[in-house]
Image (cartoon, coloured by chain):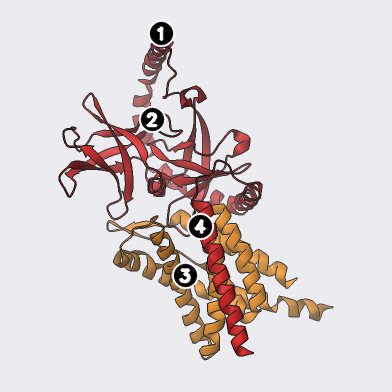
Chain colours: A red, B orange
Amino acid sequence: MNKLFNRNKMLIILFGIIILILFIGFSMTDRESTTKAEQFTGDTVAASQSIIGAPVQFVSNIFSNFTGLFGASNENEALKTQLEMVPQMYSDIERLEAENEKLRDALEVSSKREYDTINSRVISRSQDQWLNNFTIDKGENDGIQEGMAVMTPEGLAGMVKRVNGNSSFVEMITTNVSQNNLSVEIQHADEAVYGAIDHYDSERGLLVIDNIKNNAKVEAGDEVFTSGLVGDFPEGLIVGEVMEVENDEHGLSQNAYIQLASDPSEIDVVFVLERDPESMGD
Amino acid sequence: MRIIVIFITSLLLMYGDFLFAEFSPFEISGLTVYTVPKLLLMYILLLSIYVNPSISSFIAIVFGILIDVYSGLVYGVHTFGMVAFVFFMHTAFRVFYKDFVAMAFVVLSLTFLYDAYIYIIYGILGLVNMPVFDYLALRSVPSLIVNALLFVLVFVLTLKSSKVRKNFLSKH
């Protein structure tokens, strides 16, 4: 009897492991859409979390407002100075945009840089604190779709992995690059060097671009942008800055180490970017 | 009645875990230190002793799925992990002498092992490449200390929720 019980237990454990492997396989595949069951579960948890989290948010806002009072007048002065330049910048941008539009029309190309933004707030972070993934308070009903780029005011942060009705799950770029290489361009002086981010070095906290040709000039301090060549990401989003360049172990190519512009642990407000569909023909 | 109280307590503890992620990790003299509380896991493990293993397994499955679908990148890790750890708790408690210290030791060891289990799975899938020493010094041990402090709270909650049914029946 005892033996039979043990055998049953063994079978249950084996069955469990097989199911776990199947689930892992299912979640690691690139899916184009989120199932209704996932959307329902995600939305229910997000909604109840917003209700439970509201008092905590309220208290933490009071604290942050209070601490923000210190040094507010100095900050105000500095911001006012910056603000005086804004009208001039706006008019410059409008003039350049109009000029750009005319030139594009003349060349009959659609811009990979054009996108609309959807503002959103982070409502929760991954509770196991491993991958810095987070959930935002906008979903399908607000026009968000899987694969869209997610930015912070500083730079690219991640991409939308799953979309529910009123919330979405965002995968950080540091996790995502280990599965899908992100195509980027490094701006060195006026030249663009193209490459793909291979992985995230968590020990150093830097993204790694490998296989850069030896004759390509890349230096620390160069800015890195998305290239818009692969995937749904628009062109020209700030990814970060080159911190270090070194030859690979065989000396055949160079590796560049990039500091991410956005800080993964300090993300509160994000923008989801909707790329102009005309520029995604291929 | 009791199952409702257990469910609501579990829900609140799950959000407690989520809330902690807002404050952690933090920097101490240039080092990033993670403190990962396991309020829900400790509650589920204690339920398997103070209530019964079936209810504990049921809560483990329901909340495992919720966590996986809501905030998990890899499905099944939490669901499978929580159920397996309830099973370990049940087995361990047949071996250990049943007193508070032994129970606290087993529960805290299991929270320690649970995080290690997720570390290993993510490591195998290539999602995490934190060196083992860093993991132990900057994540595992600080989390263990935080969990040891929070254990008292969870223990009181478990005792309260295990008594709900008795109170309910005595009134009628």
**Mark in front: 1 vs 3:** 1
Q: Which chain carries label 4?
A: A
- Do badges 1 and 4 share one subunit? yes
Residues under numbered marks 3 and 2 in contact, where contact means CB atoms less than 8 Å apart:
no
Residue at far bottom of view: B97
Q: Is mark 4 on a helix, strand or loop?
A: helix
Q: Mark 2 lies on which chain?
A: A
Please tell me which of labels 1 and 4 falls first in the chain.
4
Q: Position of residue B67 (x, y in %)?
A: 56, 58
For mark 3, what is the residue?
B114
Which residue is painted at 60% across and 34% down in the image? A142
Circle 3 packing at 10 Å, graded few (<14), some (14-19), many (20+), is some
**Mark in front: 4 vs 3:** 4
Q: In this view, does B87 lie above or below A265?
A: below
Q: Position of residue A173 (x, y in %)?
A: 40, 44
Q: Mark 1 and mark 2: span between their CA atoms? A: 22 Å
For mark 4, what is the residue?
A24
Q: In the rendered image, which quarter contains the N terminus of chain B? A: bottom right
For mark 2, what is the residue?
A229
Q: Is residue A73 left or right of residue A243?
A: right
